[in-house]
């Protein structure tokens, strides 16, 4: 099997699974209980939380969730409901994940107004575009650090600094596709979402990092937890394994980035020799994704053709709707043909050069049969 869909999810590392099993076996108490078993389980959570804060260079609140989708919902809906007395205007882009558009659609039904900033020819957000759309009623700007289909890396640190001039407007960043792949400063970010299963952790655990000064309306009510913003019995094993996965993912970010970059360049050089292949990638994209379009071929057709060789790629974000046309590629290229024929190849430090060679051979056969 050749797995090239790391942007959808990753296989948990053995060390992460070992941590999960050990904590599950050794710390059986409910962390909310006042007896020794509960206190010991809670201590594991506190230790893991402190480790995560250290790794992210932050002292802000960590709210544990089931993953980035819940974190995004809590950040957007929770903040909008809490601060709606200030205004009901939100700014975002057309390059976001479906778990951003979902809560925004919900809020629009509640009377909120959403504006979309335009991007330049490189897919990058112009600060002037944000400035033009901010009003006295703007309470939130939500922008992903890295687009989930193309890999565009927005300058969110710079945007956050710019938004400091608007103290009544908060800045949320979906960093799901960034953490563990590229360095990210949280200094000028008010809320940040991420999930363990994107960096070789276990599915079912994510977090929202929130500035302490910010209040949120909880989405889940009832029962004590690690914070007042999300009720439910805390999961020490998931949280401890989350911290372990994050530590391992951040150990060699620079070296891993350079290795993946070399693989990406090699693949670009290879696919560019095929006349019906168009590469949806530029210098602003992280190398961990290579989005390309085989013109005239449906993405699911290309996907299943490669699957015959036990090679796994994606048509678009795994959480996207059933529409085979990619909204992100359309926003990036303004070309419906490219958007309706794109596939996403996701690379990892665990991707081997032998796997890339095998992909090349299989792609050649698929291209001749399909294009």
Image (cartoon, rainbow, N blue to C red):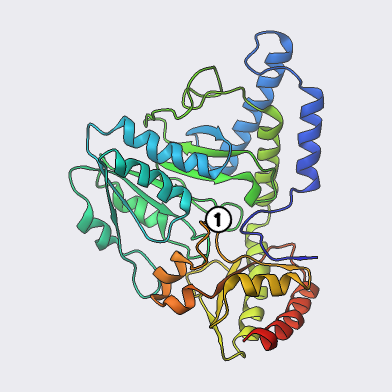
Where residue 278 appears, x then y in whole percent?
A: 53, 83
| Quarter containing the N terminus | bottom right
Q: Quadrant of residue 260?
A: bottom right
Q: Quadrant of residue 23?
A: top right
Q: Residue at x 56, y 37 (%)?
A: 53
Residue 250 visible within the image: no
| Quarter containing the C terminus | bottom right
Where residue 186 appears, x then y in whole percent?
A: 46, 46
Q: Secondary structure at mark 1?
A: loop
Where residue 152 appears, x then y in whole percent?
A: 48, 65
In the rendered image of this protein, does residue 41 appear above or below residue 120? above
Q: Residue at x 44, y 65 (%)?
A: 327
In screen coordinates, is 132 left or right of 203?
A: left
Q: Which residue is mark 1?
A: 177
Figure label count: 1
Foreground of the two, 41 or 93: 93
Foreground of the two, 209 or 161: 209
Farthest residue, direction top? 35
In screen coordinates, is 252 left or right of 136?
A: right
Foreground of the two, 361 or 209: 361
Where residue 346 appears, x then y in whole percent?
A: 64, 65
In the rendered image of this protein, does residue 358 appear above or below residue 345? below
- Crowding around mark 1 (Cα neighbors within 10 Å: few <14, some 14 to 19, many 20+) is many
Q: Residue at x 50, y 40 (%)?
A: 71
Q: Quadrant of residue 331?
A: bottom left
Residue 208 visible within the image: yes
């Amino acid at each position: 099997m050749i797995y090239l869909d790391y942007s959808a999810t990753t296989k948990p590392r053995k060390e992460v699974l070992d941590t999960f099993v050990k904590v599950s076996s050794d710390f059986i108490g409910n962390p909310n209980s006042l007896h020794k078993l509960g206190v010991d389980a809670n201590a594991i959570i506190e230790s893991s939380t402190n480790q995560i804060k250290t790794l992210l260079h932050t002292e802000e609140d960590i709210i544990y969730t089931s993953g980035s989708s819940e974190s995004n919902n809590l950040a957007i809906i929770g903040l909008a409901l809490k601060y709606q007395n200030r205004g009901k205007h939100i700014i975002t882009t057309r390059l976001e994940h479906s778990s951003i558009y979902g809560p925004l659609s919900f809020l629009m039904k509640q009377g909120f107004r959403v504006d979309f900033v335009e991007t330049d020819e490189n897919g990058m957000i112009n600060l002037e575009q944000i400035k033009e759309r901010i009003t006295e009623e703007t309470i939130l700007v939500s922008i992903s650090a890295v687009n989930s289909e193309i890999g565009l890396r927005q300058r969110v640190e710079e945007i956050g600094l710019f938004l400091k001039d608007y103290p009544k407007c908060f800045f949320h960043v979906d960093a799901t596709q960034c953490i563990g792949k590229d360095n990210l400063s949280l200094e000028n970010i008010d809320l940040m979402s991420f999930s363990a299963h994107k960096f070789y952790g276990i599915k079912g655990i994510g977090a929202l990092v929130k500035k302490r000064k910010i209040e949120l309306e909880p989405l889940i009510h009832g029962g004590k937890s690690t914070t007042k913003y999300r009720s439910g019995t805390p999961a020490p094993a998931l949280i401890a394994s989350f911290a372990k996965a994050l530590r391992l993912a951040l150990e060699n970010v620079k070296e891993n980035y350079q290795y993946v970059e070399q693989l990406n360049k090699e693949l670009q050089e290879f696919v560019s020799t095929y006349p019906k292949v168009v590469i949806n990638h530029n210098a602003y994209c992280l190398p961990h994704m290579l989005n390309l379009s085989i013109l005239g071929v449906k993405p699911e057709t290309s996907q299943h053709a490669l699957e015959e060789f036990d090679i796994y790629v994606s048509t678009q974000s795994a959480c996207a709707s059933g529409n085979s046309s990619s909204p992100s590629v359309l926003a990036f290229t303004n070309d419906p043909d490219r958007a309706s024929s794109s596939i996403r190849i996701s690379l990892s430090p665990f991707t081997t050069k032998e796997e890339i060679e095998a992909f090349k051979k299989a792609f050649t056969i698929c291209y001749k049969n399909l294009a």
